[in-house]
Image (tube, rainbow, N blue to C red):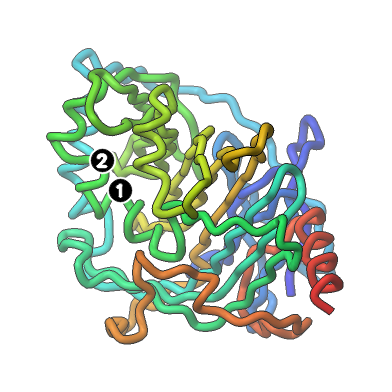
């Protein structure tokens, strides 16, 4: 086991969602909200790579001491060796990146091993935690996502036993989010001519991901429609013109439109008041190929009940990280065992507490606050 904390070399602040990977393999994980990570491998490699948007990628050499590492990432300024200016509408840059999707992403099916976690908080305390290992099958990026599926390998859940903490509200997301929100493959979600026509485009200063320069295109709603649109940023690799990160935030100006987008179902008598829905999708470039690596969704909303004066705030997170990838003749996931978008992850996994539950699987370590919450929930159940 390789473990450590990733910090900003200048400020000392911990770096969350930093990518930690073994070079020349597909094994990787991300740091949690405390900047901490663990990485389980068959044998200790010579080094690991640690990277994050806006920082210089660091190669950390490993020796006998490969646990409790203190890793400092250096923020970087961008020095351009040549000036490249897009004089036309930045929409043209996005169109070129879309046209290069068949060249920049996998041309063959792939099977991804992933770790998935979803949590819910009532005000400032956790009331629900579920997590699991899933397999995700994706066909080539020049194909549709009709045959793309997710299957749960193993999972567990904890729910507050207090009746007052329980709220049966389902918002969009779940383990199928890397299929639905993989905007590079699922062009119907955003990157199609009809939807892009509803946005205004602007070019922001360049950024760096994994020491590679990125164009940053900002999008904002440019028209009023019967449904909510997004504000967002599209990161495009300067050399390959591949999408490397997509950040989206749902327009909350019209609460009714935002509710229709976010909410799947709720109990009668509950009033749902949306506050935030945001997501970002990370892709990783390696050996000439760009692959999906991490997705995180955030939902914030208030709920109140008729005859009650005050509303209650809730926050839900779901995130998935690709921890490994099978490129050698991957087998499709059958519809019989696949997870459906209408399914609830809670209903598909069991409640139990086992220190060795994850065995050799790579996971996103729980943050200190989440770890304490899990222990409290376990004690309440006991």
Residue 73: horizontal and vertical position, in percent?
70, 42
Residue 307 vs 162, above or below: the answer is above
Residue 16 shows in this picture = yes
Residue 238: horizontal and vertical position, in percent?
34, 34
Which residue shows up at 58% across the image and 66% down it? 22
Say whether marks 1 and 2 touch (CB < 8 Å).
yes
Residue 25 shows in this picture = no
Q: Quadrant of the N terminus?
A: bottom right
Total labels drawn? 2
Which residue shows up at 83% across the image and 70% down it? 380
The residue where tag 1 is placed is 183
Image-based side of 257 in relation to 167, left or right: left
Query: Is tag 1's residue or tag 2's residue first in the polypeptide sequence?
Result: 1
The residue where tag 2 is placed is 190
Image-based side of 139 in relation to 19, left or right: left
Q: Quadrant of residue 372?
A: bottom right
Residue 123: horizontal and vertical position, in percent?
72, 43
Which residue shows up at 64% across the image and 63% down it? 364
Residue 179 vs 71, above or below: the answer is below
* Residue farthest front in this picture: 307
Q: Quadrant of residue 83?
A: top left
Image-based side of 368 in relation to 154, left or right: right
Looking at the rendered structure, which numbered label has been put on residue 69? none
């Amino acid at each position: 086991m390789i473990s450590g904390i990733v910090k900003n070399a200048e400020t000392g602040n911990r770096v969350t969602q930093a990518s930690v990977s073994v070079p020349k393999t597909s094994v990787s994980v991300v740091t949690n909200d405390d900047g901490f990570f663990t990485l389980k491998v068959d044998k200790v490699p010579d080094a690991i790579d640690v990277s994050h948007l806006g920082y210089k990628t660091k190669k950390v050499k490993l020796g006998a001491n490969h646990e409790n590492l203190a890793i400092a990432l250096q923020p970087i300024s961008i020095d351009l060796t040549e000036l490249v200016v897009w004089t036309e509408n930045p929409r043209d840059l996005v169109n070129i990146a879309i046209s290069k999707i068949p060249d920049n992403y996998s041309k063959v099916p792939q099977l991804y091993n992933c770790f998935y976690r979803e949590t819910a908080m009532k005000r400032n305390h956790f009331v629900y935690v579920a997590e699991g290992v899933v397999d995700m099958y994706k066909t080539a990026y020049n194909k549709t996502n009709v045959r793309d599926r997710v299957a749960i390998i193993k999972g567990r859940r904890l729910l507050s036993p207090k009746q007052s903490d329980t709220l049966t509200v389902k918002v969009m997301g779940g383990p199928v989010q890397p299929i639905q929100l993989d905007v590079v493959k699922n062009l119907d979600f955003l990157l199609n001519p009809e939807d892009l026509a509803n946005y205004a485009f602007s070019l922001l200063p360049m950024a760096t991901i994994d020491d590679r320069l990125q164009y940053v295109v900002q999008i904002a709603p440019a028209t009023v429609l019967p449904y909510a649109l997004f504000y967002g940023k599209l990161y495009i690799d300067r050399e390959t013109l591949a999408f490397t990160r997509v950040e989206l935030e749902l327009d909350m100006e019209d609460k009714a439109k935002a509710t229709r987008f976010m909410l799947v179902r709720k109990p009668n008598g509950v009033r749902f008041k949306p506050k935030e829905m945001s997501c970002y999708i990370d892709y990783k470039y390696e050996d000439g190929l760009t692959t999906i690596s991490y997705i995180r969704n955030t939902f914030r909303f208030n709920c109140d009940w008729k005859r009650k004066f005050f509303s209650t705030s809730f926050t839900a997170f779901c995130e998935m990280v690709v921890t490994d990838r099978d490129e050698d003749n991957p087998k499709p996931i059958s519809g019989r065992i696949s997870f459906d978008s209408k399914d609830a992850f809670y209903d598909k996994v069991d409640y139990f507490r086992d220190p060795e539950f994850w065995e050799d699987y790579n996971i996103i370590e729980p943050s200190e606050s989440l770890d304490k919450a899990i222990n409290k929930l376990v004690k309440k159940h006991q």
